[in-house]
């Protein structure tokens, strides 16, 4: 019942906001809906921690220690971003970038987008997972094109075409898994239930499984923004509203990687070799290297941090590819730290761009002089994502690098050089934006940075001291990913 409530809140809210989303109280309704989703997700987290995995509606929905942490993270960041977007979108309306009609669409699609991601995470059926991911694509297309500028419409079309082509590959991979499993389970929906497939994974045809994984990795890898399937991501981040950039980087990429991992767990034992792990490491490493060097020539602040997201998803994918308990632990931790930090950075970036009236880095200068809060927020967020202590990203990066030195020492120099290049690229650009000669103006509505500081506070606390129950939770989940 709890799972269904968590799913119903965003979908019903999305429908209602489609009718009242332009009213003055719509933003509060958006926040209240997101808060309720977070509250029930927290309750579900408690129940899973206490009683173990849970199903709903027969076998249609399944939550275990792996997906519940991402479900809670999705709901929580959905809530804090809704808080941030209240003032941000008011400024957008004040600057005449948005009409009340567009605001109505924004509020409605925001909830639908959160709902489709939660459905992707909690469904037990690989077919429904694909449908939910496609639903997330469609709702995001409307959000990216919200400003109706030539650039935003072009970015939305690019996103729609590339992700649709990519996700059609994932559909083909899902169909292949179904046909391979049908020979063991018989025809019917059982052959698409992840728990049923997991029970017979060693009996699935290895040849079909290998081909299926290639299609799934390309399909969901496109959504995840892995190089060379990433071309939609920088444009979508740059042209969509900033709260949606925060959700895309902080949450959607996680959901796509979660889908890949669920399929890897099924397919690796069936084919009896480490091909899926090697494929993840190859895509992850390529993403880290390419994104790090592209960062050097970025002139748009949102594109800068979108390439940083590609780099970090590469790190997480590489860690999952190594697949040891400590590597899985590091991947889970880095997924959490990156989501909290990157969504926080986009909150600071959004207000910085509003003050400058431009997303160009050369126009965003001297923030600390005119608006110390935004300036320091951008600096703190950047130091956090670059992996400086005491932030939690330092801990997760340190674990990934030391594990790489033990498990795949040949890759460690490549990762270290790439991280150094990324550090130099981002830090050199952030200095001017924070400490340069001021070119920014005052905003009509005060910036809302409380959500930013909530995220950064959690990242610092987890970097300095990780409570035993979180450590045990991640470690047990990391070990579970090996034996599932």
Image (cartoon, rainbow, N blue to C red):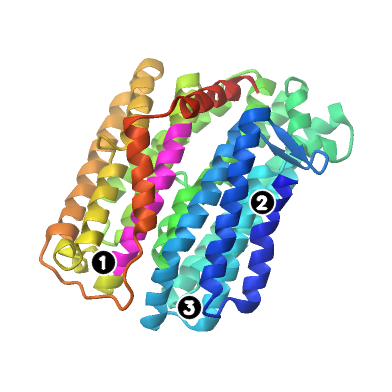
Q: Residues within 10 Å of mark 2 (few under 14, many from 20)?
A: many
Judge from the rendering whether residue 243 lies leftward or rightward of residue 482; answer left or right. left
Name the quadrant of the C terminus. top right
Point 37% across, 22% down: residue: 404
172 relative to 426 in the view: left or right: right
Give the numbered dot on residue 148.
3
Residue lying furthest left: 437
Residue 239 quadrant: bottom left
At mark 3, the secondary structure is loop
Q: Of residues 93 and 403, which is closer to you in this image?
A: 93
Determine whether the residue tagged by mark 1 lies in a helix, strand or loop. Answer: loop
**Chief secondary structure of the magenta portion:** helix
Q: Is residue 335 magenta?
A: yes
Q: Which residues are magenta?
A: 332-353
The residue under label 2 is 6
Decide: few, some or many residues near mark 3? Use Cα within 10 Å; few <14, some 14-19, many ≥20. some
Say whether residue 195 is left or right of residue 401. right
Question: Dot 1, how many residues are within 10 Å of its Cα: few (below 14), some (14-19), or many (20+)?
Answer: some
Q: Residue at x 29, y 43 (%)?
A: 384
Q: Which dot marks residue 360? A: 1
Q: Is residue 254 left or right of residue 390?
A: right
In the displayed orientation, state which residue is furthest to the top: 406
Q: Is residue 140 visible?
A: no
User: Of residues 224 and 390, which is closer to you in this image?
Assistant: 390
């Amino acid at each position: 019942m709890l799972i269904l409530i968590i799913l119903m809140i965003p979908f019903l809210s999305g429908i209602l906001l489609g009718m009242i989303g332009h009213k003055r109280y719509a933003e509060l309704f958006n926040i209240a809906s997101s808060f309720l989703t977070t509250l029930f997700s927290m309750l579900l987290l408690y129940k899973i921690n206490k009683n173990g995995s849970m199903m709903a509606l027969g076998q249609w929905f399944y939550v275990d220690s792996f997906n519940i942490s991402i479900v809670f993270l999705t709901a929580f960041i959905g809530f804090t971003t809704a808080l941030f977007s209240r003032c941000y979108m008011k400024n957008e309306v004040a600057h005449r970038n948005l009409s009340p009609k567009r605001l109505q669409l924004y509020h409605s699609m925001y909830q639908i987008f959160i709902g489709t991601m939660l459905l992707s995470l909690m469904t037990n059926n690989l077919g429904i997972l694909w449908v939910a991911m496609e639903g997330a694509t469609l709702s995001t297309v409307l959000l990216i094109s919200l400003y109706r500028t030539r650039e935003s419409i072009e970015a939305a079309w690019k996103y729609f075409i590339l992700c649709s082509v990519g996700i059609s590959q994932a559909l083909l991979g899902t169909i292949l898994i179904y046909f391979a499993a049908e020979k063991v389970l018989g025809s019917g929906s059982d052959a698409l239930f992840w728990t049923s497939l997991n029970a017979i994974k060693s009996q699935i045809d290895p040849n079909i499984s290998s081909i299926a994984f290639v299609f799934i990795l390309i399909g969901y890898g496109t959504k995840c923004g892995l190089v060379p399937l990433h071309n939609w991501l920088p444009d979508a981040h740059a042209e969509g509203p900033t709260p949606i950039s925060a959700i895309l980087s902080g949450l959607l990429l996680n959901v796509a990687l979660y889908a890949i991992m669920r399929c890897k767990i099924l397919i690796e034992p069936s084919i009896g070799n480490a091909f899926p792990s090697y494929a993840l490491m190859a895509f992850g490493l390529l993403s880290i290297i390419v994104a790090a060097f592209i960062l050097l020539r970025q002139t748009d602040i949102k594109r800068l941090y979108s390439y940083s997201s590609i780099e970090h998803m590469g790190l997480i994918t590489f860690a999952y590819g190594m697949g040891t308990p400590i590597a899985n632990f590091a991947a889970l931790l880095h997924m959490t730290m990156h989501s909290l930090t990157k969504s926080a950075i986009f909150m600071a970036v959004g207000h910085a761009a509003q003050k400058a009236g431009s997303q160009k880095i050369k126009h965003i200068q001297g923030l600390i002089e005119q608006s110390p809060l935004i300036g320091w927020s951008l600096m703190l967020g950047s130091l956090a994502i670059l992996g400086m202590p005491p932030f939690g990203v330092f801990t997760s990066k340190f674990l990934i690098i030391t594990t790489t030195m033990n498990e795949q020492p040949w890759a460690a120099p490549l990762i270290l050089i790439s991280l150094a290049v990324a550090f130099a690229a981002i830090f050199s650009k952030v200095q001017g934006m924070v400490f340069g000669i001021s070119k920014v103006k005052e905003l009509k509505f005060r910036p809302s940075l409380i959500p930013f500081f909530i995220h950064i506070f959690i990242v610092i606390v987890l970097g300095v001291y990780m409570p035993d129950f979180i450590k045990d939770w991640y470690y047990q989940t990391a070990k579970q990913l090996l034996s599932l």
